Amino acid sequence: MRWLPGSSSVETWLLRKILNATGGAPVRLVLGDGEGVSPPGASPVATVAIHNRPALFRLLLDPQIGFGDGYADGSIEVDGDLVDFLETVYRSWPSLQSASWVTRLTARWSERLRVNNPRASRNNVHHHYDLNTAFYQRWLDQQLVYTCAYFPTPSATLEEAQIAKMDHICRKVQLQPGETVVEAGCGWGALALHMARRYGVRVKAFNLSHEQIVLARQRARQEGLSDVVEFIEDDYRNIAGRFDVFLSVGMLEHVGISQYVELGKVIHRTIGASGRGLLHFIGRNQPAPLSGWIRKRIFPGGYVPTLGEAMEVLKPWDFSVCDVENLRLHYAKTLEHWLARFERSAPQVSAMFDSRFLRAWRLYLAGSLVAFRVGTMQLFQITFAGPECRRIPWTRAHLYTAGSRQQEPKWMHSMS
Amino acid sequence: MRWLPGSSSVETWLLRKILNATGGAPVRLVLGDGEGVSPPGASPVATVAIHNRPALFRLLLDPQIGFGDGYADGSIEVDGDLVDFLETVYRSWPSLQSASWVTRLTARWSERLRVNNPRASRNNVHHHYDLNTAFYQRWLDQQLVYTCAYFPTPSATLEEAQIAKMDHICRKVQLQPGETVVEAGCGWGALALHMARRYGVRVKAFNLSHEQIVLARQRARQEGLSDVVEFIEDDYRNIAGRFDVFLSVGMLEHVGISQYVELGKVIHRTIGASGRGLLHFIGRNQPAPLSGWIRKRIFPGGYVPTLGEAMEVLKPWDFSVCDVENLRLHYAKTLEHWLARFERSAPQVSAMFDSRFLRAWRLYLAGSLVAFRVGTMQLFQITFAGPECRRIPWTRAHLYTAGSRQQEPKWMHSMS
């Protein structure tokens, strides 16, 4: 793919426009193998080669989609470390603060009007989660947990950190043997099985992804847990029954802000005023839509809320926020592990799909890593409780005591 | 104070109206020494005697102000434990959920339009905090900390719990020797002095209360800390200079929602993108105005925000919420200590002021205790950090490790 003959100074001028749009990141942009531009000063961290004119024009028209699609189809290449390159661009990109209030308001209302009805949700889920399970097995941990891990120390392995995350969640909601738990969006079932196995609770777990539910049921059978863990292929809006605890890990991002009130109703219907629960989700500091490319190619229907926006789920029902933990740095670390494993499996991924898929997913993983590292994205775990809940621990110390699962924490009702 | 002659069945009917308005709480209402009503079933936890007609009409006209003023002037008396009585009424009181959306919207917007300019703030602060310091010394802890304590165990003393609270805050923001801290709303200076004494930081602490600032300066001199802790009698809006850390404990309740954007500007101006901070404040699950009586007699200009509303302070500046802890039960426990000490000092308080003051403050302390116990009020500690902050601890484990002040936590920048 050589640059077309006749590349002109007009195109060099266009390159400069692109470079300026990045906020003057220290990167070098070149047209094919020829002319290039880079900002004065710092030496470039990477060279971005744009191999043809359509790629250049797409980049000008819509930088996010243009770069993502161009990178995926190979018409744009990055010479240098992709993560370093993306981190450099993210850090110099003009922040949302400088966006006009019209832009911000429009973005916000377009999210509120977005339709995420059950059919749309099913299609959105199918797009991402019904990919070949063997693909995810190549780069996730052994238990297939596709959400932010919790690293007690930064040197913990991914396997250890995913187990620690599940325990962290179970301790936060103080699971007791014999209690009932409903999980909305359960992936391949790792958390549901973990809760039943280690905490002696009964679980109903919901998921719209057929591929994931099939594997989850198979795992439950293999472990002899089918009588205590039920995997249901259905929308969270159809959850019925009463439970002690409501959990949702990595689903709120797919719910869409227009459905938060509906989700709140579901939570209230299932746990009532005496229940408790946890929401684990990717969040932001300020309202903003997802990157156009991520939403078009990776997560259709996705929206990442601020903490204030997420309150819309809990507020109407007088749920109290007991605890919020931001695990942003843990998601960056999780993604470092995923990306390294993904790269080691690159030949197999290419063979399973094609090189375009490989490059698109590399960009998605590297871009997500950088978003958490620089703070474009946050990861919130919110623990909440109904107004009549008696299972509020006195302090959070039990989360950090070795072997704390065996220790009964002091409860609110023994306090007053 | 005997009931007027000619108390009629109309007045009994009015008593029933009042009883119904409480949601049918199991309490007995009597007119003077005569006729009374109580709901069928459960035996009453207390008897409320209404001694004259004006008190009855004020109660009908505005239950909150009518009860508070009537209780304070002695025209309404409670026979039975005041805390038990209030808890019973709070628990059966119709919740905000059943309020119409017009009521809720009106309440919300009247808060947004409330003027809390520097002059109004000064008057509001003077009303409460410039009371005789000797009065507060009778029932607060030795260091005079007039905010929610942190009880590592429920049996900790108030003195221990206030010190633990100050350490908890200092550890949350990870104070390092030589750093600079600004405190907005510093009371009698206990936290500012604690930080300088135990963590080796330099502090500028702001407060509008003249009485409090005078004592705080005297304490700094006595401890030989005047060169590292500066107490400034001024409005938070006038804070100038750059600092590593911004702290505010128990001030947001007085700021008023109309000034949250202004407070955010002050925080951003003082700590910039690399700083970190903590807001400790009384909050709610759902937006609502303070009780009319509390706002009229105890905290003029006060407003208690939801967590979502408090985000208005941080959101415009891309501050990340790192951690939120809800210490509601700790405030109930703190108020149990305050109320018990207050009751032990009742004769002296009466002598300092008068019996009306004594009764008003008893009601305020008992009502606050109950509000935190039943969940009408929450206590949030929000730890936050600017987008370029490098002092984000890897986990929260260091908060719960004995002697953690000596341990250097792992920082974000050593992680990536």
Image (cartoon, coloured by chain):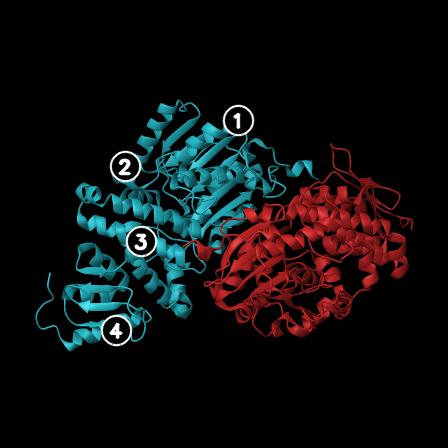
Chain colours: A red, B cyan
- Secondary element at tag 3: helix
> Distance from label 1 to label 2 (Cα)?
32 Å
Badge 3 and badge 2 both on one subunit: yes
Foreground: disc 3 or disc 4:
3
Identified at 40% across, 66% down, the residue is B96
Residue with the mark numbered 2 = B133
User: The N terminus of chain B lies in which quarter of the figure?
Assistant: bottom left
Q: Residue B227 appears at what percent x and percent y?
A: 42, 23
Instruction: Report, in whole angstroms, how far the alpha carbon at label 1 lies from the one at label 4.
Output: 62 Å
Instruction: Tell me where residue A344 appears, x and y as whole percent.
Output: 86, 49
| Residue indicated by mark 3 | B366
The secondary element bearing badge 4 is classed as: helix
Percent x, y of residue B6: 9, 73
Subunit ID for the residue under disc 4 = B
Other residues around mark 3 within 10 Å, as few (<14) / some (14–19) / many (≥20): many
Do tags 1 and 4 sit on the same chain?
A: yes
Report the residue at 77% width, 48% height from top: A337
Question: Residue B178 shows which numbered tag?
Answer: 1
Q: CA distance from mark 3 to mark 4?
A: 25 Å
Q: On the rendered structure, is A252 left or right of A295?
A: left
Which residue type carries mark 3? Answer: Ala
Chain bearing tag 2 is B
Mark in front: 1 vs 4 = 4
Q: Are marks 1 and 4 in contact (CB under 8 Å)?
A: no
Question: Residue most toward the left?
Answer: B5
* Residue A288 visible at all: no
Point out residue B180 in the picture as x, y percentages from the top left corner. 50, 30
Tell me the residue at 68%/46% (across/down).
Answer: A151
Q: Which residue type does callout 1 highlight?
A: Gly
